[in-house]
Amino acid sequence: MRDARTGRTEGERLQLRADSYTSLEGSVARITYVSEETQYVVARLDVPGKPDPVTIVGTVLSLTPGETLRLHGRWSHHPKYGEQFRVERYESVVPATITGIRKYLGSGMIKGIGPVFAGRLVEAFGEDTLKVIEGTPGRLAEVEGIGPIRQQRIVSAWAEQREIREVMLFLQGHGVSPAYAVKIFKAYGQAAIATVRENPYRLARDIRGIGFKTADRIARELGVPADSPLRAAAGILHTLNELTDEGHVYVPADELLRAAEKRLEIPAALLPDALSALDADEAIVVERPAAGRVVYLKPLHVSETQLARRLADLLRAPRTLPPVDMAHALPWVEGRTGLALTDEQRQAVRLAFQEKILIVTGGPGTGKTTILQAVIRLLEAKKVRVHLASPTGRAAKRLAEVTGHDACTLHRLLEWNPREGGFQRNARNPLETDVVVVDEVSMVDILLAHHLTQAVPLAATLLLVGDADQLPSVGPGTVLQDLLAVPGIPAVRLTTIFRQAAQSRIVSNAHRVNRGEFPDLSATPADARQDFFFLAEDDPLRLRDLIVGLAQRRLPAKYGLDPLAEIQVLTPMHRGPIGAGQLNAALQAALNPPRNGTAELLRGGRIFRVGDRVLQQRNNYDKGVYNGDLGRIAAIDPSEQSVAVRFDDREVPYDFSDLDELTLAYAVTVHKSQGSEYPAVILPLHTTHYPMLQRNLLYTAITRAKRLLVLVGTRKAVAIATKNDATRRRYSQLRERLAACSAEAQAVLDSPRDPGIG
């Protein structure tokens, strides 16, 4: 039917409105939905003159209730949800209404002001509240509870927000979130806009969390041409960093340039000059071995070359441990500890006292812990100074428990100093020790291995323990595998599985998988004596529901497990219906739902709630927390803009702007689980995980479970993972460098050993 006045049908009217670009201004009343991956938002906006809130949809970054927005976009009509405003561009403005001001201040935007003080301020000053804070801050003392200290904090925070606002408005216009705008401001101060205009690609290098794509988008909008030498150099550096994130220590130059050309979509002829410029600026190192040019990030080149040299120096250095009569020492330690050492284990103990460097490797149940217990007991008896360390806090705690000796993380051992941005223990200030023992060494990447060996005194002995068949380190390199591949470095490979361990289906199936054999899935949950079960489910959505049911009800009821403290879901991938992202949302809703009085926070599309399990996603040396550390949210303080997370025995504070470092950890990827053990593990394995179905991933996941493993999914996916041992070789020259450096030491290594030992 046509409108008598306009002559248009309702459909024509709606289409005309949709085609019209317009503006809208209002206060955010409620956030209905935020996509973590895309930042697509559905929210309700209070617009002056409209009786009901308006639904807005589109990409709007880090939205805050009470925030006033000026939106630019088009109206649309959704067949189910009705009229919506599609946002194409927006800017944040200071709210003008009492309600808006109260929501704005109460949201935690200004440190020192939470919902309570926001209400008191608005009650005292009404619509002039922001003017008072801005112009006559002395009047804040009129409000109950605001003394001189809180007043100064509010004034300082508001001044910072005012300065940040300019930066935010500039950066939001180029698609940068407010959280990152704060980080940019903290990095560059009042020079932020000038710095970004001069070289926007600095953001990708200087600001944690801002990648090349964002920096490139800003650069293009600022007029930097696509074929700019600045862009070409930044693109090569970005590509090299991405490939490094995949585990490579170096990248062949031709492969790097092809990848950069594909990402940048610029003529290949521009890239060699950009590569040469980066080499001249010492941002990278270009080497020319026989196989052709290779390119390193400078820190990785330093780490690889110096690690090889230091290990060779350690091998050459004289042995300083006191002589031990193993014929008497081994029976003595067995009698004192109740251990019964196999011939294989006895040889490992002998070599620990005989060699300057020793690697002990083997799968679960092969006796690595027994060897450590014996070695530590003998070292203590000889009054030898020994330090024990592991890459993660959980692994260090477990090492201390099984050996009865103090242990710590490698970062704590090496004394990371956040103020100076480096380790205090190094070649100039080595550890005061005779023996350094490192467990879970498969997790140690090339950078950490370099810093460790620099801090080990040449007179000391280095004992490295780990499982070479597990996934390699999250960081670049394959240090353990490379060391084992060099004949000159002594190593013991444990193969015997102890009878008690062999009775565990977790252990036996781990070894079956490692041999390329299909695991035994015959046990059923009805058999309470078993520790390994398989539940079949092909439909991904039903599989997700099955996982939630196991974690929430079935396993706690049958085994008395605490679902928040003792059950861990491990998954091969982050994305997808049974990836870590969606599993975390479902598990959070089931295990830690919203409750009256429980503080929560919406940040970056994620809800953080007191009691949530969270995972640290990158090394933060300032806070002393590292990639893969698990914690629980202890408190959320909107007025202070801070979240307290408990990691084992300590609480760590996070500013709201730092929460991109955390993610929910009800489910974590197998890669992130390295170095950790859990009482019970639920492991989904499905053909939707196909890109990650690899033998060493399945093997690693199985070995993370201490008492119970429930494998859920499809037999086909298990078969694919078991058969697929074609793991991608990481680019590294550590083996070659070690072989070259140790060639000089070969005469020493081949010389007769001290007859007093063994």
Image: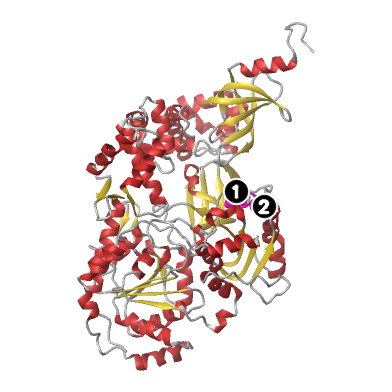
Q: Looking at the picture, tell me which residue is in the foreground, 307 or 572.
A: 572
Residue annotated with mark 2: 540
State the SS at label 2.
helix
Depicted 171 relative to depicted 408: above or below: above
Q: Position of residue 633 (x, y in %)?
A: 56, 53
Q: Looking at the picture, tell me which residue is in the foreground, 67 or 551.
A: 551
The crowding category of the residue bearing disc 2, from other C-alpha atoms within 10 Å (few below 14, some 14 to 19, many at least 20), is some
The number of numbered badges drawn on the structure is: 2
Kind of residue at badge 1: Gly
Mark 2 and mark 1: Cα distance apart in space: 9 Å
Q: Looking at the picture, tell me which residue is in the foreground, 349 or 725.
A: 725
Depicted 462 relative to depicted 615: above or below: below
Colouring convention used in this rendered image of the protein: secondary structure
Kind of residue at badge 2: Pro
Residue occupying image coordinates x 38% and y 51%: 244
Q: Which region is colored magenta? A: 578-591
Determine which of the numbered discs, if any, sits on residue 576 in the image: 1
Rendered-image quadrant of the N terminus: top right
Q: Tell whether position 586 is magenta.
A: yes
Which comes before the other along the chain, label 2 or label 1?
2
Q: Tell whether position 588 is magenta.
A: yes
